[in-house]
Image (cartoon, grey):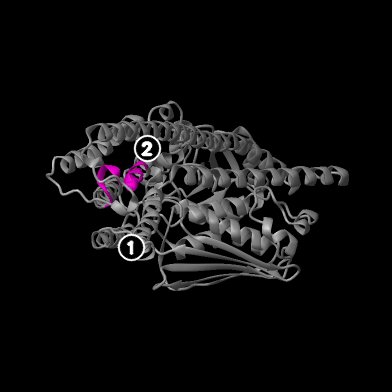
């Protein structure tokens, strides 16, 4: 059975750009266009990996969702799912993220614009090819 | 979008801030006072021994020496950096009060109401006009008139011994003649009031204009940032989509299709670069304009952050990217800003260095001097000597860079310099065409305090 990846991003074109290489690599891709839909699908479908845009409707939407998925109150089933966070270095949020920040519970970072090759590299680090 | 709502606007019509000019006003006063003190000494000596004028030279020497003495103390005091504005204001008023005391003494010892030194008061009235609103300047002009009038009253009533300067040809009785005193006071007061009014009004207009220009530049930078930011998302998603096609995640393309897709990807990449540079540039201008406060930033962390960000590009070329760490230290900067500076410099170095070349980043700390100096050195194409003087200009690109296939916008270095200067640091660039480029930054070390106010630009 193909492993499932949930991609959460409010830009349908970005979703498509990630879906194409991921499907080519044999993953099943589930889309979510906002954080509520993302949380819903994460809970109901329990994907093997979540790719999350840090900046959706608000500066902190992706950040809050990561907390809900991986925070201390999150159920174990959600906390086990690795998260790749998509960020833009040049975004003008007051917050800056580093992969080593202990307050940001994600496994990897990916920079915008997403390069398909890098995307697969990061994904394969967390979900090695079977 | 942070800062979006803070677009400056109506508040500028209210009160312009004369306070920003305070440090330079204080220094101007000190410089003028050296000249004033010395000329009192010199003029007394020439008048007494050169021209043989009989005057109370001991008292005049004492006044000149006193002026120089308190000016020394004031100069020493003004050297302390970055004080809160109320303290600087107070210091300035102390200066003015001391000067008025010295001037009143000078007028007294050079003939009171008949003294040729009377006109010196007008200098200070004009000076106050540059710092005060018209009402305050008028009040100060009247205070000067009251001082002169009071001195005249004391001398004519005999409460204060009058000093007569017969040798100057002044009628020794003038100080007792009411009509003369009234006439002098009338002209003195009207002159002082007029000067105060004129100077204060002009100064106010200048300050208002300055505030308006400042607000316009700020709004412009905020607009650039907001507009550019809106461009970023569509370009990023277009680029991501085109890359999936370019890298063959869809069906095979015919060779002409592949060429077109590759060209589209290259143009989008250029656009992305332009947007990123513009964002950096707008951020650097906003930081400079808003005088965003500086904080201690870990130099090593900011550098390694940027090095790691640029490493994929170096590996792609490939170019050897080396870091020679110096002693751990915190410099005065802003956190995202410093990484922007380093990323820009390292990115430039990698971009303009051919495959197989080297980029070396190192820093050394000079604690006694209070500097950390950071060097980014490459073995790249270099910059022609003719282009070096213009290399920090906005949108300027060196001729050899323009001819190359390297994508660039010419605003990265302008943003870097604006930011470094905002930090109170310096940037220098030396380069030999065909051999490489070295950029050297000097950044101020952070004082041990946790927070540090933004310094006025030097």
Asked if residue A52 shows in the view, the reply is: yes
* Closer-to-camera residue (A54/B272): B272
Q: Tell me where the magenta segment starts and ends, as one range.
A: B110-122
Q: Earlier in the sequence, mark 2 or mark 1?
A: 1
Judge the density around disc 2: few (<14), some (14-19), many (≥20) Cα neighbours within 10 Å.
many
Residue at 58% x, 37% y is B224
Chain of the residue displaying label 1 = B
Q: Position of residue B138 (x, y in %)?
A: 32, 31
Residue at 36% x, 43% y is B119
Mark linked to residue A128: none
Question: In the picture, residue B448 is in which quadrant?
Answer: bottom left
Q: Is residue B308 left or right of residue B87?
A: right
**Magenta highlight on residue B33:** no
Q: Position of residue B53 (x, y in %)?
A: 33, 59
* Closer-to-camera residue (B13/B420): B13
Q: Position of residue A43 (x, y in %)?
A: 43, 37
**Magenta highlight on residue B116:** yes
Secondary structure of the residue carrying numbered label 1: helix
Q: Which residue is mark 2?
A: B129
Magenta stretch secondary structure, dominant = helix
Q: Which residue is mark 1?
A: B48
Q: Is residue B208 left or right of residue B428?
A: left
* Closer-to-camera residue (A10/B62): B62
* Number of numbered discs overlaid on the protein picture: 2
Judge the density around disc 1: few (<14), some (14-19), many (≥20) Cα neighbours within 10 Å.
some
Chain of the residue displaying label 2 = B
Q: Position of residue B185 (x, y in %)?
A: 28, 34
Residue at 78% x, 47% y is B262
Foreground tag (2 vs 1) = 1
């Amino acid at each position: 059975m193909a492993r499932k990846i949930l991609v959460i991003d409010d830009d349908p074109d970005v979703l498509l750009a990630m879906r194409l290489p991921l499907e080519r690599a044999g993953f099943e891709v589930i889309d979510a266009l906002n954080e509520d839909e993302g949380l819903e699908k994460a809970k109901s479908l329990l994907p093997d990996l979540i790719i999350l845009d840090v900046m959706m409707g608000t500066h902190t939407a992706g950040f809050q969702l990561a907390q809900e998925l991986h925070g201390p109150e999150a159920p174990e089933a959600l906390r086990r799912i690795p998260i790749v966070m998509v960020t833009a270095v040049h975004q003008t949020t007051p917050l800056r993220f580093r992969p080593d920040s202990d307050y940001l519970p994600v496994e990897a970072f990916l920079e915008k614009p997403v390069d398909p090759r890098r995307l697969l590299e990061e994904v394969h680090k967390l979900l090695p090819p079977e | 979008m942070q800062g979006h709502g803070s677009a400056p606007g109506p508040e500028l019509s209210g009160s312009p801030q004369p306070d920003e000019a305070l440090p330079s006003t204080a220094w101007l006063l000190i410089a003028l006072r050296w000249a004033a003190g010395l000329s009192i000494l010199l003029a007394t000596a020439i008048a007494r021994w050169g021209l043989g004028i009989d005057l109370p030279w001991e008292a005049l020497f004492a006044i000149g020496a006193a002026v120089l003495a308190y000016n020394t103390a004031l100069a020493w005091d003004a050297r302390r950096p970055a004080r809160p504005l109320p303290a600087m204001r107070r210091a300035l008023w102390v200066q003015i009060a001391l000067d008025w005391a010295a001037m009143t003494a000078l007028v007294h010892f050079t003939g009171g109401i008949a003294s040729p030194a009377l006109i010196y008061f007008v200098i200070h009235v004009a000076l106050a006009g540059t710092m005060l609103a018209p009402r305050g300047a008028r009040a100060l002009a009247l205070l000067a008139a009251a001082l002169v009038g009071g001195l005249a009253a004391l001398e004519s009533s005999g409460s204060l011994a009058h000093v007569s300067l017969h040798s100057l040809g002044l009628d020794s009785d003038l100080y007792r003649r009411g009509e003369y005193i009234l006439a002098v006071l009338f002209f003195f007061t009207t002159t002082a009031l007029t000067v105060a009014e004129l100077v204060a009004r002009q100064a106010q207009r200048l300050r208002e204009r300055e505030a308006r220009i400042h607000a316009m530049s700020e709004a412009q930078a905020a607009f650039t940032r907001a507009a550019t930011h809106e461009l970023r998302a569509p370009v990023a998603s277009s680029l991501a989509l085109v890359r999936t096609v370019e890298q063959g995640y869809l069906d095979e393309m015919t060779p002409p299709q592949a060429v077109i897709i590759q060209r589209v990807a290259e143009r989008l990449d250029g656009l992305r670069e332009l947007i990123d540079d513009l964002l950096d540039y707008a951020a650097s201008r906003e930081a400079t304009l808003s005088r965003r406060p500086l904080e201690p930033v870990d130099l090593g962390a900011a550098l390694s952050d940027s090095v790691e960000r640029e490493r994929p590009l170096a590996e792609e070329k490939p170019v050897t990217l080396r870091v020679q760490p110096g002693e751990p230290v915190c410099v005065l900067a802003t956190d995202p800003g410093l990484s922007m500076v380093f990323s820009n410099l390292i990115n430039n170095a990698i971009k303009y260095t051919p495959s197989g070349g080297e980029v070396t980043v190192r820093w050394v700390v000079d604690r006694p001097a209070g500097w950390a100096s950071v060097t980014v050195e490459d073995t790249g194409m270099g910059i022609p000597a003719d282009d070096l003087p213009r290399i920090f200009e906005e949108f300027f690109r060196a001729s050899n860079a323009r001819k190359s296939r390297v994508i660039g916008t010419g605003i990265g270095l302008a943003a870097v310099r604006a930011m470094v200067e905002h930090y109170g640091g310096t940037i220098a660039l030396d380069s030999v065409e065909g051999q490489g480029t070295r950029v050297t930054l000097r950044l101020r070390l952070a004082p041990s305090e946790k927070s540090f106010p933004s310094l006025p630009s030097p």
